């Protein structure tokens, strides 16, 4: 296996793991308490702390795991995919939040030639691309903001 193929495979695996971590973070955002949680006063602040703590922990671990092989891209991917997963959790539900990051990872895994990569596939760009980092941060801010204000969408089932 050539060094380019090895580097490409490591990049793909890193992207898939970042999408998985984002899905887990968004799935953990679902509250098992429902209405009692909404009756307490610091819920938005606790939601924000919860999401940011998990995102920082996952980003740090992925950055350490990719040390020497573009760790900033791994951190950017975790942040961007987490924002995308949180946006999905607010629209669908926390249990289905993994679908959007996974689908986007499949989309971004397609471009093999770096010259053909556009801004829609920002995870495939190197960490030196500032626009890709800005897109990931905007996704994280939008996802965290939507989740902090409204939480995840919950499906109510009628037991009888």
Image: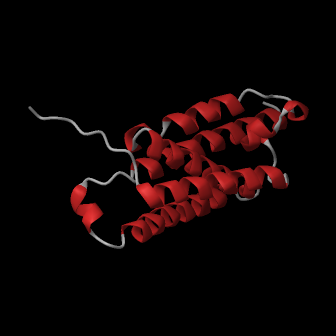
Residue 141 figure quarter: bottom right
The quarter of the displayed image where residue 10 is located: top right
**Is residue 5 or residue 62 the one in the foreground?**
62
Front residue of this view, candidates 46 and 79: 46
Residue at the spot x=83%, y=34% of the render?
A: 117
> Measuring 36% from the left and 73% from the top, which residue is drawn there?
42
**Residue 55 can be seen in this image:** yes
Q: Residue at x 35, y 51 (%)?
A: 30
Task: Say which quadrant the C terminus sits in.
Answer: top left
In the foreground, 106 or 7? 106
* Quadrant of res 116: top right
- Position in image of residue 4 (x %, y %): 83, 36
Q: Is residue 79 left or right of residue 24?
A: right
Q: Is residue 49 above or below residue 156?
A: below
Front residue (pair 107, 12): 107
Indicate the colouring scheme. secondary structure
Q: Give the farthest residue toward the left.
A: 160
In x, y percent, where is residue 104?
63, 34
Please determine whether, in this image, residue 133 is positioned above or below residue 41.
above
Answer whether residue 69 is visible to the viewer in this image.
no
Left or right, residue 145 beside residue 76: left
Side (left or right) of 78 relative to 154:
right
Where does residue 82 sit, x and y in percent of width and height? Answer: 56, 50
**Figure label count:** 0
User: In the image, is 136 to the left or to the right of 92?
Assistant: right
Q: Residue at x 53, y 58 (%)?
A: 144
Image quarter (top left, top right, bottom left or bottom right) of the N terminus: top right
């Amino acid at each position: 296996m050539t060094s380019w193929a090895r580097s490409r495979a490591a990049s793909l695996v890193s992207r898939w793991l970042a999408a998985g971590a984002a899905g887990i973070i968004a799935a953990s955002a679902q509250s098992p308490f429902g209405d009692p949680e909404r009756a307490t006063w610091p819920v938005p602040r606790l939601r924000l702390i919860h999401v940011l703590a998990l995102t920082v922990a996952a980003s740090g671990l992925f950055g350490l795991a990719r040390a020497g092989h573009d760790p900033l891209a791994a951190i950017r991917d975790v942040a961007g995919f987490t924002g995308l997963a949180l946006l999905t959790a607010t629209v669908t539900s926390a249990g289905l939040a993994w679908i959007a990051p996974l689908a986007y990872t499949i989309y971004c895994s397609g471009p093999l030639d770096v010259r053909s990569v556009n801004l829609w596939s920002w995870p495939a760009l190197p960490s030196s691309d500032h626009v890709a980092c800005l897109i990931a941060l905007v996704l994280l801010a939008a996802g965290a903001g939507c989740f902090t204000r409204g939480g995840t969408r919950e499906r109510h089932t009628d037991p009888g």
